[in-house]
Each structure stands twice: as structure tokens, then as C-alpha cells.
Amino acid sequence: MAVAPWHHAELTVIGRVSVASNVTLVCDAAGITGPDGSPLRVVYKPVRGELPLWDFPDGTLAGREVASYLISEALGWGVIPETILRDGPYGPGMVQRWVDAVDNHTEAGNRLDLVDLVPPDAVPDGFCEVLRAQDPAGNEVSLVHADDPRLQRMAVLDVLLNNADRKGGHAIEGVDGQVYGVDHGICLHSEHKLRTVLWGWAGRAIEPDLIEDVTVFAKALPDRLADTLAAHLTDTEIEALARRTQDLLDNPVMPTPRTARPIPWPAF
């Protein structure tokens, strides 16, 4: 695989994502331009800025983000933007290509995001209702997500990754027409921890083309891929990934919630 120039370019910090739990920096890659001619933008999460998690004691969150990207690529899905582990201004960390997102809220028009809140009596066609709750003002609202095959593919990936934190804001509709998932630092635990806002397909059969990709992935996992993942995950976590993969092939249906807290908080 060719090494992209930004893998080694000097990173210039231009801002910080203040709402992130761990240090998340937005950077430009020196001397590298994107398709539109502007400086190539990346997200950089230094390992030294990670907050310790008692239930994820092994490895680093950065390593789990890289492992999640490698799994997405091995499936051929491209759900996660290119993600690598490299040095940066504050030491080693995860560096990921920035995704330019569609702005659904403009003067020309206003449409729902991939994951959104609507009044309970106003769930539009093409959306799945996940739950009903109250907003801070006490008004009843419905949490919905698009019934979109691009998003459904992400939901299947989350089952394999055992994603414990699929918030609404972690699903991004890119201006290139693709749907991307970001923030995979608390994935791939050996114990069941699936928490997601994408429960709208629970109990539905998974599309055959996605199962075909998972079948190919299951055959590749024990060989070179497992060796590559071993740099970021424990043997127990890789074995659990293999079990989740086989479970999905044995029963190709989207799972239903198994815990009392199946949705991350906050949901966005």
C-alpha cells in the first residue's frame, strides 16, 4: 500500500474540538493540499491527551481507532476515513483525514440530519424511530435516523466493532456523497458493550451483499489481518471479534438491545 504524503507531513494545529472528552485537535498537513486546493485537514488525537477508562485498560484509544479503520477497510466498506498512528506536535497519536460534511441547515432549505430529533407525530418517510424522550424543555421528541443503506452498513460495522459509543454526531454525511463514521476509541472490547443510536433496523435481516462482505472478512481475519490488529488489540479482543463475526454469519439479523443502557449518553 502506497504511503500518502500526509502520513509524514508536519501538522499545524489550527483548533481544538472543545466538546470531545479527549484532546481532539484539528490540524493542517504542511505542504499538502486537498482536492479543492486548500490545505489538507486532519484530526489528531494524541495518546497523551486520552482520559483513562477503567473498562478499557489495555492499549490506547488511538490504537482502537486505527484497528477499527483497518477492519472497515478489510470489509471493503470505507466507512471510516483513513486513519493512522503517527507522531504529531504532542507525541504519538491517531491522525485521521477530515471529512467535509453536508450542511443540511441552510437559508436555501432545511432537512433532517442522518440522526435527528423530531416531534413524535412528525417522523418523516424514510426515517426509523428509535425511541421517544423529553428534550430539556420537557417537550416529547422522537430520536430518528435515516433508513439509508449507507447508514445501515455503518450499523453492521458497529456490531462487528462492538462500538460502545455510536452517537448521532459520529455519523457524517460527506459532501462526496459517502456516509462516514468517526470516533471509534471505545470499540472492540471482548465483552458486549454495543451502544448506538442506530437501533432502527433491530430484528431485520441484514442485506445479502453485506453478509457476502462479512463472509470474506471472516476468512481473512485469522491470517495477516489478525497479525496487523495485534499491534493495537489483545488476543482476547481479536478472538472476540472473530466470534462476533461468526455469530453474525450464523444469524444474519441486526441485533436487538441486550442491556438496560443501549444508547450512549448524550445521544449527540
Image (spheres, rainbow, N blue to C red):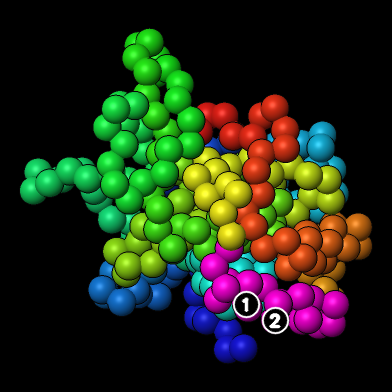
Q: Secondary structure at mark 2?
A: helix
Residue farthest toward the bottom in the current orientation of the protein: 2
Look at the image and tell me in which quarter the N terminus lies.
bottom right
Q: Is residue 91 visible?
A: no
Q: Residue at x 81, y 37 (%)?
A: 55
Is the residue 142 above or below the residue 157 in the image? Answer: above
Of residue 181 and residue 138, the one placed in the foreground of this image is 138
Q: Note whether 51 is above or below 205 in the view shown.
A: above
Q: How many numbered circles does the render carry?
A: 2
Mark 2 is on which residue type?
Answer: Val
Query: Is the Cβ of the residue at disc 1 closer than 8 Å to that at disc 2?
Result: yes
Q: Which residue is mark 2?
A: 216
At label 2, counting other C-alpha atoms closer than 10 Å, the crowd grade (few under 14, some 14-19, many 20 or more) is few
Residue 236 is at least partly visible in this image: yes
Tell me which secondary structure the magenta stretch mostly adopts: helix
Report the magenta residues as a range: 206-225
Q: Where is residue 263 shown, x and y percent of the image?
A: 59, 34
Whether residue 18 appears in magenta in the rendering, the answer is no
Residue under pointer 1: 213
The one nearer the camera, 113 or 259, is 259
Disc 1 marks a residue whose amino acid type is Asp
Is residue 118 found left or right of 245 in the rendered image?
Answer: left
Q: Position of residue 18 (x, y in %)?
A: 47, 35
Q: In the figure, is residue 250 to the left or right of 109?
A: right
Left or right of 52? Residue 40 is left
Residue 50 appears in which quarter of the rendering?
top right
Q: Is residue 93 above or below residue 218?
A: above
Residue at left offset 27%, top offset 75%: 37
